[in-house]
Image: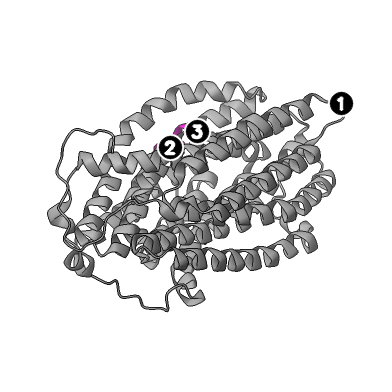
Amino acid sequence: MAVKLPHPPGSYREILAVSLPVIAGMAAQTVMMFCDRIFLARHSVWELQAALPAGILAFTLISVFQGTAGYASTFVAQNHGAGNRNGVAVSYSQGVFLALFSAPILLLIGVPGQEVLKLGGHPAHVLALEEVYFRWMIIAGVGATLNAGAASLWSGLGRTTVTMAAGMAGAALNVFLDWILIFGRFGFPEMGIEGAGIATAISSFVPGLVLISLSMSGKIAREFPIRSLFRFSATQAWKTIRYGLPSAISVFMDVASFSVFVFLTGRLSPVEFTASNIAFGVNNLAFHPLLGFSIATTILVGRYRGAGDSRMAARVTRRTLVVALLYFSAIALTFLLLPGFYMNLFRSPEVDVPFEQLKATGSVLLAILCMWGGFDAVSLMLGGALRGAGDTRFVMLLSTCLGWLFWIPGIFLLYRGPGTGVISLWLFTTLYIALLAVGYFVRYKKGPWRTIVLVEHGDQLPIPVAEPAGRG
């Protein structure tokens, strides 16, 4: 059964129709995180310093589960491209079930995760704040993983407006609760960073619950047999894990390496540490939209590879890369021309960090981001294309080897060298991201992804039934 598409296949209109709602949803998350950081900076510079290490460590632990559950969207996309309605319903169901099964594991690994925070060697007052924020971020991770599984249906079908609306609802609630709980409004106590954590934990469950409810009713339930096939299938769950876990591990290793980087900058001077944290916060304005384009690339490549059309998959990859680079070029200009504007957003009542020094260091880091982000755009688009085609093992191997055999040893050597500061560490990180982009480019041009088959064609393929998982 042919899939009817509302826009010309492989066109910029199709790319924008899929990516813009994703980006809008990412923008909502970006605004949420941006407001969160600004609120914390206005409350205490120490809470701002604690939020990034604790948040990135929590995301590191969450990413494996979130990435695996979310990879169900690739199976949804490929089944949709192949015209297999049953496969769409079953693939989506496994994303939700894998998210639910991961919840108790996430809560358990949060306990040893707090011990990892102590390895950062941060001052005692910052560590205490990190531990508080980390506990709530792990709970928020349960909601985020549920959202990843629930969003797989809509993302895989390219109906990203729905995921955008659900994500915006959660982000809006988060910002509102941040303001109430951090500063103590409407009779609530002033809770600072713990209030920020509670706000994120509560709001993280909103998108997933909304998306699951919508999938069981209305037009989507009439179009796909979701209610009748919403059950666990060990066969399809294993396939999701088999291809999704390498993709998730690559994200885990990537984020874990950045966690090491963030913790290492925490041992630098207060000015350098705070400037680095602020620059990371500003980078979200570039990174999250680029990630949205990457997700759109994964969706569209998955759809066309499911339909057996590698030529169209290559076209959408090229075009999303063009759009992503155009977007980043525009945002990079603001980094160069308006560094003072960004740094002023994070003015803090604390006097321990001289603002003029902070502004000077932060301006240099924002300039470095102009190079960093360009390479990031290339690696995100090509990595997204490889994931959509199922070439997840290569993505895992490249990111792991470059991150842990080159980047992390390199920054430790730089850190121990005489006179090394945050600027040297950021420049070396830019080199690492450039090499990552080159690796993805070489793999993409060689083209093994064109021959990977995740799903078979046909609208009425047999419905998978529960059976012991095995090698497939």
Q: Please say whether residue 137 is one of the residues in the magenta stretch.
A: yes
Within 10 Å of disc 1 (Cα), the crowding (few <14, some 14-19, many 20+) is few
CA–CA distance in space, label 3 to label 1: 33 Å
Look at label 3 and name its amino acid: Phe
Left or right position of 153 against 234: right
Position of the N terminus by quadrant: bottom left
> What residue is pinned by disc 3?
134
What is the number of the mark on residue 343?
A: none
Lower position in the chain sequence, tag 3 or tag 1: 3
Q: Nearer the viewer, mark 2 or mark 3?
A: 2
The residue that appears at 68% across and 34% down in the rendered structure is: 407
| Part of the protein shown in magenta | 133-139
| Residue 272 location (% of width, % of height) | 77, 38
Question: Which residue is nearer to you in this view: 378 or 366?
Answer: 378
Q: Secondary structure at mark 1?
A: loop
Give residue 64's mark.
2
